Image (cartoon, rainbow, N blue to C red):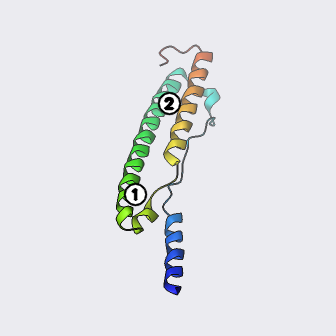
Amino acid sequence: MKKIAISLVIAALLNGCANTTANPVQLAQVGDETKSCRAIINEMQEMKDSALTAEGDRNKQVGSNVALGVAGAFLIVPWFFMDTGNAATVEQKAAQARYKRLKAMGEERNCEGLQ
């Protein structure tokens, strides 16, 4: 009984370490007021790229969790290594919100070439 309790405590600790921490981009940043049209357009492209990268990370996480879930049907240990966080989704939404803000800034300044 004591071994089972110790195993459960270790499993709970390992499960707590399996989540990925989100690192979202800030919506408003220092220097936004002084950005040129070219800088706004360049950063808009960076935000598109960041959103695509986050989407790829989320797809990779889902695939990994599916594989660990299937393996966990035979051995319970893989379930403890599943990443149940939503860091990629948070990062993707933050990049999309930043993109919208940059687009609005560009429209206010009448920048040409906005996507």
**How far across and how far down the image is residue 48, in percent?**
46, 31
* Residue 16, placed above or below residue 56: below
**How far across and how far down the image is residue 75, in percent?**
37, 68
User: Dot 1: what SS?
Assistant: helix
The residues bearing labels 2 and 1 have C-alpha atoms spaced at a distance of: 38 Å
Q: Residue at x 47, y 56 (%)?
A: 83
Q: Which residue, given by chain and number where applicable, does mark 1 sit on?
A: 69
User: Dot 2: what SS?
Assistant: helix
Q: Which residue, given by chain and number where applicable, does mark 2 sit on?
A: 43
* Residue 11, placed above or below residue 92: below
* Residue closer to the observer: 37 or 25: 25
**How far across and how far down the image is residue 51, in percent?**
47, 36
* Residue closer to the observer: 5 or 24: 5
Identity of the amino acid at label 1? Gly
Identity of the amino acid at label 2? Glu
Asked if labels 1 and 2 touch by Cβ distance under 8 angstroms, the answer is no
